[in-house]
Amino acid sequence: MNTQGTTRMAAPEPRHLPQHRNFKISYGLLQTLGVLLVLVIIMQIVNERFLSPVNIGNLLGQMTVALIVAAGMTIVMIAGEFDLGVGSMVGLSSALAAWLMTRWIPLEPNEQAAWWTVLVGLGVPLMVGPAVGLISALIVTKAKIPSFIVTLGTLMIVRSLTLVVTQGQPIPDVPPLLRALGQGRWIKLPLPFDIAAALSSGSISDLIVWLPIQNTVWIAVLVYAAAWFLLERTAFGRKIYAVGANPKVAMLSGIRVDRVKIICFAIVGFSASLAGLISVMRLGAASPNSGEGLEFEVIAAVVIGGTSLAGGQGRVLRTVIGVIIIALTRNFLNLAQIDLFWQGCATGGIIIAAVLLEALQRRMSVLH
């Protein structure tokens, strides 16, 4: 028996493959960061006050709701599913919170809501989102109906319930404590922003600007820290990637695929409910149209961030870049005084471009 010949026939595994794979991942990240950098440069040229501390702080606050929802959407899309009901769930959660705190028990003029009604107004919406997510997940997993269709139905149902709760009218007068929490800027960060002042004075200390950060931004930071830990440092996170990559293989490996998807839908429902509460605290009121169309912007941001539409691939921290790109695009259109009616075309174009880019990258990875 020629063992020497057998040894020659066994080709050694190429050692450059891991580096090649990491290069492709890094290339996608650099591509996304490049788009973000171009947007920032263009917007600074259009409006020199764009990088001012006040404007940056306002932009961060405006992105908070989309950021929180996008974190949950990233998780469910990595698992290979969609949830189109997140925007309407943001609206219903904000409406329920405002109604329970201001309309559930009639108040006299200038009378403040009792502390326990505030707690109920905060707690009930946080349970409604996961409950709706569980119902959608059970229909998707047990009836084997595509999540796109199921969550499209929940979008319509939940949006209708929002109109029922609000009666088509805004609900103002959210308790002052919550408004102070949502609109306050209790922490400031030193960032090197004021380049012009530093050049004119010649002092490096003038380069530092104290950036006021809205309190709600820190809630989004905690959400992303939890989502990153779940996906990157837990066994359940590895199961999410396995289910999204190939559900049949995951099932043969002993993973309970349906349970993983049900939990993912509950997570995205919770993130939408939390975003609804953030919206109420920031605005001090609930609007019947709150969250309308948010689901499509969030999906576009998640795809721009590198999460695959087919599932099994994505990083939650890269989703932040996608949300920022969407927000900067809207801000740029406002600065350029583009009519509001045309801004939907830009958002739709970004969605199509993101999908085409994701398909192109997937095809290139197959070829190589």
Image (cartoon, rainbow, N blue to C red):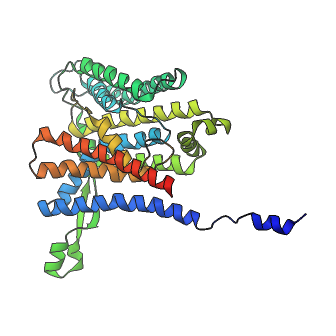
| Residue 348: percent from left, percent from top | 25, 41
Q: Quadrant of residue 38?
A: bottom left
Residue most toward the bottom? 202
Give the quadrant of residue 235. Answer: top right
Describe residue 308's horizontal placement relative to residue 181 as left or right: right
- Residue at the spot 67% in from the left edge and 64% down from the top edge: 13
Q: Looking at the image, which residue is at 54% across and 22% down?
A: 142
Q: How many numbered tags mark residues here?
A: 0
Where is residue 322 drawn, in percent x and y?
33, 50
User: Which residue is nearer to you in this view: 302 or 111?
Assistant: 302
Residue at image location 52% in from the left, 30% down from the top = 262
Q: Is residue 236 visible to the viewer in this orientation of the structure? A: yes
- The quarter in which the N terminus is drawn is bottom right
Q: Image height check: is 365 above or below 183? A: below
Left or right placement of residue 296 versus residue 138 in this view: left
Q: Residue at x 84, y 69 (%)?
A: 4
Say above or below: 51 vs 361: below
Residue placed furthest toward the right: 1
Q: Is residue 214 visible?
A: no
